[in-house]
Amino acid sequence: MNDQLEPDWDPRAEKVLRDPSAAYDEMRERCPVAYSDYLQWSLFRHEDITRVLNDHHTFSNVVSRHLSVPNGMDPPEHTAYRRLIESYFSPERMEAFESTCREIVADLVRNALAVGQVELMAEVALPFAVRVQCAFLGWPPTLHAPMVLWTQRKHEATRTQDRQALSEIAREFERFIDSLLESRLQAGAKPEDDITAALMHEKVGGQLLSKEKMVSILRNWTVGEVGTISAAVGILAHDLARHAELQEQLRAQPALLPEAIDEILRIQGPLPANRRIATRSVEISGRKFKAGERISLIWIAANRDGRVFEDPRAFRLNRDPSKNLLYGAGIHRCPGAPLARMELRLLMEALLERTTGIQPVPDQWPSQAVYPASGLATLPLRIR
């Protein structure tokens, strides 16, 4: 390992935590391949990150001691599990789930309008992410509160690198999944009953999924996604609140929403980074990595790289969508992107259609989320 290297930056420095996007922009231009004690190697340029994403032989996704299906696997094992996962995000499944998602959105927007002023992250964004993910999996409303708690605890344990806490959270989640699976087993649940029951009947290589693999999949679809979706909701609402003209444009032309959402989230991403491990000695932009060293891909920096995006911090609807790394690229591109895009579109549609104005609250400022989260921790808004 590079024990003798001097750190190029400190990802936990006050100025980085205060304005992560600006700090990542500065690193991309000053030191695009940077070493730190906290993250080991970090990549900031679009070109370098794209290279890693498209070379899974050199840069492995097996980065955790805990099983992660399929995003923590490499080919050939990854291939079969990826195929299985993708089937749950088919156009047919998205169409079938849309009406349920609309009902959740309508309820949350109605409640926000009733009070007129909300702390959007706690009262809309996080409840939305939890309720939608639970509904998608066929889980009851009684699990909403535990899901919020797991999300918060996992974020804090990840931030502090508390391995004991992370292990305890993983064991707690496994016990919870055990009870869900057992209840479905006792009831003789069929694949068509809900997604959780469907997973119990899935086979890979002629073998039913092990409990460990089902727990991993369900953890990724819940605790792994809730934080990212809620962050995205906050980023989108904050951007609309600051740009009244964009609000009006999207109210008048809702068909622009899918493209507008991806562009807003390109500028201020809901997921700061993803990890890889080098499988062999390799050089990127003049810096040499050893086999086994950790690499963080700083998505936000790549998506604001002026070498790829002209005037990168400006909102534009005519950019090449293939360059946007919001959902990753290559064989590990986010399989749940169709669900995430539908969720965000429906919520933004409802917010714009059912309101006449979304505004910041005077003298009440949003607070920044702390790495490894992105976006905002709090967001006071007036909604009318």
Image (spheres, rainbow, N blue to C red):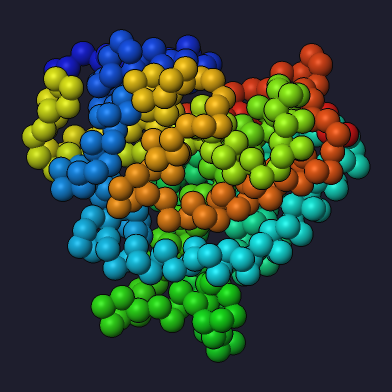
Please state which of residues 185 and 199 is positioned toward the viewer in this rendering: 199
Viewer-proximal residue among 294 and 300: 300
Q: Nearer the viewer, residue 241 or 362?
A: 241
**Residue 322 place in picture, x, y as percent:** 40, 40
Give the residue drawn at x 35%, y 66%: 83
Q: Quadrant of residue 140?
A: bottom right
Q: Which part of the image, by quadrant, shows the C terminus?
A: top right
Residue, far right: 114
> For this view, does 230 lie left or right of residue 281?
right
Q: Position of residue 74 (x, y in %)?
A: 23, 55
Residue 76, placed above or below residue 45: below
Left or right of residue 83: residue 60:
left
Residue 53: which quarter of the image? top left
Whether residue 374 appears in this view of the structure is no
Q: Residue at x 64, y 41 (%)?
A: 257
Determine the image quadrant of residue 314. Answer: top right
For the N terminus, the quadrant is top left
The residue sitting at the bottom extreme is 188
Measured along the vertical axis of the image, is residue 247 above or below residue 30? below
Identified at 59% across, 44% down, the residue is: 258
Number of dots carrying numbers: 0
Q: Is residue 223 above or below residue 250?
A: below
Task: Determine whether, in the image, residue 365 is placed left or right of residue 91.
Answer: right
Q: In the image, what residue occupies the spot 56% across and 68% down? A: 93
Q: Is residue 98 visible?
A: yes
Q: Position of residue 350 (x, y in %)?
A: 76, 46
Foreground residue, 366 or 236?
A: 236
